[in-house]
Image: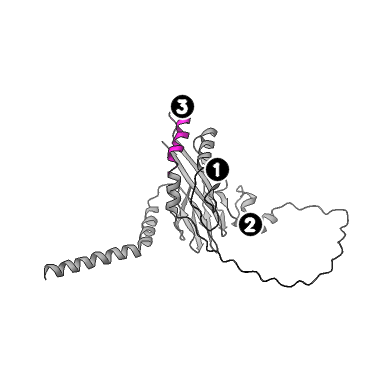
């Protein structure tokens, strides 16, 4: 075999390998992330029992999402996200079983009602005594079922006379076709990390009072389609300092993202101070 022929073969192998890596980059990354989950030593709180559609799962230390699959374990501070036509059944060790409906975002927690609701609703599939979900988290049917019955009013209700209906001509309106576009997880992560200087200033102010403080603050923010942060809040913290938490919230609210044509994006982001 001549040297030129060998070089051509080697070049072909390199090109084929590079092309395959590009084509299957997402699959390879997702496989690696699922493999990494098996080595997670955090206490297991529940697991994914059933998933319809590409339900997204995210670990607390990353904004990179992967597809949730049946049998996947859930730990404290993990996030589960459903979009349109997607749902997921989550079973907790406590016995509680719920179905997360489309357009929902929850953060798994090891305290309280098992989940912190950032958006959406759930359907309770198996109730557990002592565990009560907030009313705003329940779908309309279940929320209505839990409402106390109102006593009948004594005064008779007189129906108003019906107004004669006038036939109206149908109005042809153009249908709006909107392509929903979201922001990439990597971009969101980069914008938040760019606030590190300002977040560290908040932390430095706290260290003046308690120089040995270390901990973690879980935050949630809602990014509107114009790129502005409409809501930022602390959803969990190991540092009991309201001033530090308010400083972090104010910093996140000033973050600016690029505009996009889609629904508001709700993300949870952990901030570690050590």
Quickly name the residue at label 3: 208
State how many labels appear.
Answer: 3
Q: Position of residue 44 (x, y in %)?
A: 46, 50
Q: Position of residue 172 (x, y in %)?
A: 67, 71
Q: Residue at x 84, y 53 (%)?
A: 153
Q: Which residues are magenta?
A: 194-213
Magenta stretch encompasses residue 185: no
Q: Residues within 10 Å of mark 2 (few under 14, many from 20)?
A: some
Quadrant assignment for the N terminus: bottom left
Of labels 1 and 3, earlier in sequence is 3
> Mark 2 or mark 3: which is in front?
3
Q: Position of residue 218 (x, y in %)?
A: 49, 43
Quickly name the residue at label 2: 139
Distance from disc 1 to disc 3, alpha carbons, whole Å, reads 24 Å
Distance from disc 2 to disc 3, alpha carbons, whole Å, reads 46 Å
Of labels 2 and 3, earlier in sequence is 2
Instruction: Name the element at disc 1.
Output: strand
Q: Position of residue 15 (x, y in %)?
A: 26, 65
Quickly name the residue at label 1: 233
């Amino acid at each position: 075999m001549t040297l030129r022929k060998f070089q051509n073969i080697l070049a072909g192998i390199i090109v084929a390998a590079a092309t395959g890596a590009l084509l299957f980059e997402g699959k390879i990354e997702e496989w690696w992330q699922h493999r990494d989950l098996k080595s997670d030593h955090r206490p297991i709180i529940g697991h994914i029992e059933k998933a319809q559609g590409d339900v997204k799962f995210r670990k607390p230390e990353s904004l990179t999402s992967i597809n949730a699959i049946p049998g996947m374990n859930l730990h404290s501070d993990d996030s589960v996200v459903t979009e349109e036509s997607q749902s997921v059944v989550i079973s907790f060790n406590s016995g509680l079983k719920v179905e997360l409906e489309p357009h929902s975002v929850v953060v798994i927690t090891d305290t309280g009602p098992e989940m912190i609701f950032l958006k959406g609703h759930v359907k309770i599939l198996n109730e557990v005594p002592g565990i009560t979900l907030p009313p705003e988290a329940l779908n309309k049917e279940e929320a209505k079922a839990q409402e106390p019955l109102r006593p009948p009013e004594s005064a008779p209700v007189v129906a108003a006379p019906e107004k004669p209906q006038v036939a109206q001509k149908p109005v042809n309106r153009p249908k709006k076709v909107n392509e929903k576009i979201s922001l990439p997880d990597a971009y969101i992560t980069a914008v938040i990390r760019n606030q590190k200087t300002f977040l560290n200033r908040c932390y430095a102010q706290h260290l003046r009072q308690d120089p040995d403080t270390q901990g973690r603050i879980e935050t949630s923010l809602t990014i509107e389609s114009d790129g502005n942060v409409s809501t930022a809040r602390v959803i969990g913290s190991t540092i009991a300092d309201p001033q530090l938490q308010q400083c972090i919230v104010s910093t996140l609210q000033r973050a600016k993202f690029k505009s996009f044509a889609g629904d508001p994006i709700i993300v949870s982001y952990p901030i570690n101070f050590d």
